[in-house]
Image: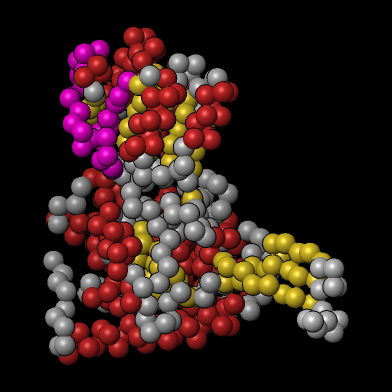
């Protein structure tokens, strides 16, 4: 296991200087990147995708080493699934980069414009954030997604992947660097922190001498909590994905059964996986058993409230802690509620404001759900697993943000921009 380098040692000083130099290189690369033409950025992205596919064998070999190390370290099946790459997933990484390449370039886009009575013409125009730091765990695909999204939005990026995915991330990063070089853009536009020492994260949280503009953490609750507590620069993040599915009395049973299994079991380790199922008490006698049988047959453990355990013998008794637990595993907590009112009360009490879904045919129920729940993503008659930038047509995402300032929901190319005002006059002065 890696340990934090001791303070005031030569090793610690070397990491401080390494990270400071990384920040300086990123800031230098950010300027030409911010003014790069859409055509040049698109060429770089397409070259990066081609390089990913051309280096597939190399990336798979690196990932195999990470998987072996992860299994030896006792990583859970859900975490190993996040880490694993295969031919299909590598092709998916390359395809995501190509989708990003096809997106409209946000830089220079006029968000709004208007004329003042004095003749001034004002435009609000999208501009890159500058240098973005991305700190992530277990997911080597984030290396490509984050690099591509930052490039498309005109930002330089510093990537700090976890030690568990270090070999995979390095192999993917080599392909990204090659693509940048082929397009004539600075290789320092996408940097991967070369050390796995944890103190490098601390240097990023300090802001790298003012050279880091935003930090985006992508990983477990402890990582995100640390970043939110210690960062001296703005953070786009969600602490956890405690996602709910509510089955209303007006729901179509067959639709509900299909959605619930997918929402929980498609991939249990993603932040959009459903963790709590709420069922209208009025339909429990007929709906509950089919819904829970489907989940059990798919390999899911059921933890229910007292009424659920009485109606369904295979359910374990849920504790108070279960209602606020992000399992990221094949486990779901189940509770009977008094219609939409009970669902709203439960979700507003326990939600992490990430993603919630309502299964209902009654439009008034859907409207209440959409209006009275303050989560970043709300779905009607669809799986919570759609909480993903790629599924939103963004090509990919760096993460899901649940805060209310600047970015919320999937963080894609538009969310990685700020704006400035361009004011055009004809000699106006202020009296």
Quarter containing the N terminus = bottom left
Q: In this orientation, which residue lies closer to the viewer: 182 or 15?
A: 15
| Residue at screen point 66% across, 75% down | 37
Q: In this orientation, which residue lies closer to the viewer: 299 or 85?
A: 299
273 in the magenta segment: no
Task: Give the side of residue 55 with respect to residue 115, left or right.
Answer: left
Position of residue 426 relative to residue 403, above or below, is: below
Image position, residue 230 (x, y; %): 29, 68
| Residue at screen point 30% across, 78% down | 203
Q: Is residue 335 visible?
A: yes
Q: In this orientation, which residue lies closer to the viewer: 405 or 326?
A: 405
Image position, residue 350 (x, y; %): 32, 38
| Residue at screen point 55% across, 19% down | 362
Quarter containing the C terminus = bottom right
Magenta-drawn segment: 309-336
Task: Give the side of residue 159 with respect to residue 155, left or right.
Answer: left
Q: Quadrant of residue 68?
A: bottom left
Image position, residue 51 (x, y; %): 48, 68
């Amino acid at each position: 296991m890696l340990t934090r380098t001791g303070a005031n040692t030569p090793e610690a000083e070397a990491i401080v200087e390494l990270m400071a130099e990384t920040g300086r290189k990123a800031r230098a690369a950010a300027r030409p990147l911010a003014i790069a033409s859409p055509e040049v950025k698109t060429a770089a992205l397409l070259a990066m995708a081609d390089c990913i596919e051309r280096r597939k064998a190399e990336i798979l070999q690196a990932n195999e080493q990470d998987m072996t190390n992860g299994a030896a370290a006792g990583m859970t099946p859900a975490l190993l699934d996040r880490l694993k790459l295969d031919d299909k997933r590598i092709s998916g990484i390359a395809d995501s980069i190509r989708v990003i390449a096809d997106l409209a370039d946000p830089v220079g886009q006029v968000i709004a414009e208007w004329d003042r009575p004095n003749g001034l013409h004002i435009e609000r125009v999208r501009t890159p954030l500058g240098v973005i730091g991305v700190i992530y765990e277990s997911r080597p695909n984030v290396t490509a997604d984050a690099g591509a999204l930052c490039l498309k939005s005109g930002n330089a990026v510093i990537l700090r992947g976890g030690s568990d995915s270090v070999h995979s991330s390095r192999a993917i990063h080599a392909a990204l660097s090659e693509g940048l070089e082929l397009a004539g853009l600075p290789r320092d536009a996408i940097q991967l922190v070369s050390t796995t020492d944890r103190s490098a994260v601390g240097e990023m949280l300090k802001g790298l001498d003012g050279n880091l503009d935003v930090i985006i953490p992508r990983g477990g609750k402890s990582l995100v909590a640390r970043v939110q507590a210690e960062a001296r620069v703005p953070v786009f993040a969600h602490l956890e994905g405690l996602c709910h599915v509510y089955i209303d009395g007006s729901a179509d049973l067959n639709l509900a059964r299909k959605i619930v299994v997918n929402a929980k079991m498609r991939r249990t380790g993603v932040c959009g996986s459903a963790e709590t199922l709420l069922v209208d008490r009025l339909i429990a006698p007929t709906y509950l058993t089919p819904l829970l049988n489907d989940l059990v047959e798919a390999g899911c453990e059921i933890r229910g409230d007292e009424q659920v355990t009485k109606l369904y013998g295979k359910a374990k008794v849920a504790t108070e802690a279960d209602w606020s637990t992000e399992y990221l595993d094949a486990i779901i907590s189940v509770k009977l509620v008094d219609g939409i009112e009970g669902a709203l009360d439960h979700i507003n009490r326990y939600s992490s404001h990430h993603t919630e879904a309502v299964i209902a045919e009654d439009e008034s129920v859907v409207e209440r759900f959409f209006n009275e729940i303050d989560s970043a993503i709300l779905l009607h008659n669809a799986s919570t697993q759609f909480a993903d930038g790629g599924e939103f047509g963004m090509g990919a995402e760096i993460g899901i943000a649940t805060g209310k300032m600047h970015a919320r929901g999937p963080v894609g190319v538009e969310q990685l921009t700020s704006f400035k005002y361009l004011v055009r006059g004809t000699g106006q002065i202020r009296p």
